[in-house]
Image: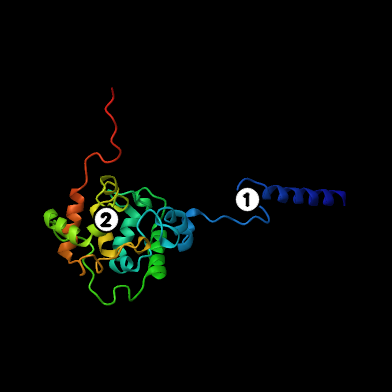
Amino acid sequence: MKVSLLAGAALLLFTAGCNRLPGAPKAGVEEVPRPDSITSFKTLYGQNCAGCHGDNGRNGAAFALNNPVYQAWIDDASLRRIIENGEPGTQMPAFGTKAGGMLNDAQLDALVHGMRSEWSKSDAVSGQTLPPYAAAKTGDAAAGKAVYESACARCHSDAGNKITDPTYLALVNDQTLRTIIVAGRPDLGHPDWRSTASGHPLSDDDITNLTAWLASQRVSAPGQPYAEPQ
C-alpha cells in the first residue's frame, strides 16, 4: 500500500514538473500568437503603418492611405509592391520578408485587402476617368512651371506650405509627387486633380509636366546650410 502511494505521489510530482519545463504553457496564461501568424488588418496596420500614415489611414506625416481617390486610382499589384518593397527615394521602407522586412505574403495580402475593404468607395471619382498611375513619358519642366503658376502657386507660395522647399522634395520621389497631385490630400485640405486654382481638371500632360518641374527644384545637398569650418 505504501509503495502504491509513493508511486502515485511521484507521478504527480513528475507531471507538475513537466508543466514547468522551459517552453511549456502555464495554466491560466493566454498563449501569445506567433508574429508571422497574425493576419488581422487592424493589428497589422496598427503595428506597421499607423506610425507614419496615421490612425485609420489619415492625419499622419505620410500620405493618407484612406483617401478614396487614391484607393480608386492605385491597383492591387502596385499597392502590394509598395508595401512589400518600399518606395525608393522616400522614407517608405520595405515590409516584405523577401525584401528584408517582417511581413509574409499572407500578411501583405491582408493589408491590401483590408485597405480596400475599409477605405474604398465606389463613387470616389464619380465616373470620371483617372489619369494613369505612372507617367508614360518624360515631362517638360518648363511647361510644368506654367501649370504650377496657374493651378498651385496661390496655395503653395507661403513659406509654411511651400511644396518647392528642397528639403521636402528630398523626402519624396516623382511618383509621390504625382500621387499627391492626382489623389490630393483631403486630410490636409489639398484637392485632387479635378479641383485646382485654374478652375479645370489637370490633364495627364499637365500632371506629368508639373511633376517634372517640381522634381527640377531638388538640390544635391538639401537641408540646413552649415557654416564652413574655420
* Residue 56, numbered circle: none
Q: Nearer the viewer, residue 222 or 97?
A: 222
- The mark tally for this picture is 2
Q: Quadrant of residue 191?
A: bottom left
Q: Residue at x 15, y 63 (%)?
A: 205
Q: Taking 91 as reference, is 198 left or right?
A: left
Colour logic: rainbow
Quadrant of the drawing holding the C terminus: top left
Q: Are marks 1 and 2 in contact (CB under 8 Å)?
A: no
Residue 73: percent from the left, percent from the top?
A: 28, 67
Q: Nearer the viewer, residue 158 or 17?
A: 158
Q: Is residue 171 visible?
A: yes
The three-letter amino acid code for the residue at tag 1 is: Ala
For disc 2, the marked residue is 156
Badge 1 marks a residue whose secondary structure is loop
Q: Is residue 40 visible?
A: no
Q: Taking 54 as reference, is 214 left or right?
A: left
The crowding category of the residue bearing disc 2, from other C-alpha atoms within 10 Å (few below 14, some 14 to 19, many at least 20), is some
For disc 1, the marked residue is 24
Q: Residue at x 33, y 76 (%)?
A: 123
Q: Is residue 134 above or below residue 25?
A: below
Q: Residue at x 32, y 56 (%)?
A: 82
Residue 79: percent from the left, percent from the top?
A: 32, 61
Residue 189: percent from the left, percent from the top?
A: 34, 63
| First in sequence: mark 1 vs mark 2 | 1
The three-letter amino acid code for the residue at tag 2 is: His
Q: Quadrant of residue 210?
A: bottom left
Q: Residue furthest right?
A: 1
Separation of residues labelled 1 and 2 (CA atoms): 61 Å
Badge 2 marks a residue whose secondary structure is helix
Which numbered mark, 1 or 2, is in the foreground of this view? 2
